[in-house]
Image: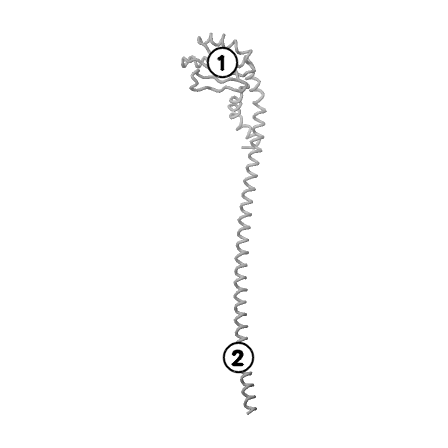
Amino acid sequence: MENKLQELTDKLYREGLSKGKEEGEALLAKAEEKAAEIIEAARVKAGEIIKQAEKDAADYRTKVEGDVKMASMQSLQATRSTIENLMVDGLVGKQTSSSLSSPDFVKEIILAVARKFNAEESVDLDLVLPESLKNELESFISGELAKTLGKEVSASFSKKVSGGFTIGPKDGSYFISLTDESFRNLIGEYIRPATRKILFGE
């Protein structure tokens, strides 16, 4: 009886051990399978992250290269414009300012323009002249110019006008600017193409 009990105990033990071992091996296999899935998913995710990082880096590089190219082109254009402006101002700036600050020269231009106004339309004229020429031009406006045109001409003197003048109908409907700045701009437009060709071969 004892032997049978021992045999039964041994049998139960072996069966339990065998079953436990099988279950353990099944759990281990399942764990290994799950670990392999996790590793594969991590590898795929890492690949996606690397791919996205490479794309982002390429996009950023393209953007930076574009920005640098645009900035260099703008810088080059600004430098060329500065050089061109210096050349044009050097060629016409001093001479224009000097001429349009000369009372005799300004008188001649005022007479020529005022006569043109008088010939085409009978209007009272309004002049704005440089403050610096007030002493030289005030008597000319009220005397010789008014006499030549046969009408009164109103004139004001402004510190905002450094040379030349503006002229127009007294009603203010329009005016013509013949200041040193407008002359420089006008003359500059004619010599800019030649200046560009000399400087930049355009």
Marks 1,2: beta carbons within 8 A: no
**Disc ID at residue 155:** 1
Q: How dense is the environment of label 1, judged by Cα within 10 Å: few (below 14), some, or many (20 and up)?
A: some
* Front residue of this view, candidates 187 and 170: 170
Residue placed at 54% from the left, 87% from the top?
8
Task: Single out the residue that lies furthest toward the left.
Answer: 121
Q: How dense is the environment of label 2, judged by Cα within 10 Å: few (below 14), some, or many (20 and up)?
A: few
Disc 2 marks which residue? 19
Counting the numbered discs, the total is 2
Depth check, mark 1 against mark 2: the one in front is 2
Amino acid type, label 1: Ala
* Front residue of this view, candidates 188 and 134: 134
Tag 2 secondary structure: helix
Q: Position of residue 30 (x, y in %)?
A: 52, 71
Label 1 or label 2, whichever comes before in sequence order: 2
Quadrant of res 162: top right
Task: Single out the residue that lies furthest toward the bottom.
Answer: 1
Q: Position of residue 62 (x, y in %)?
A: 54, 47
Q: Is residue 103 above or below residue 45?
A: above
Amino acid type, label 2: Lys
Mark 1 and mark 2: Cα distance apart in space: 119 Å
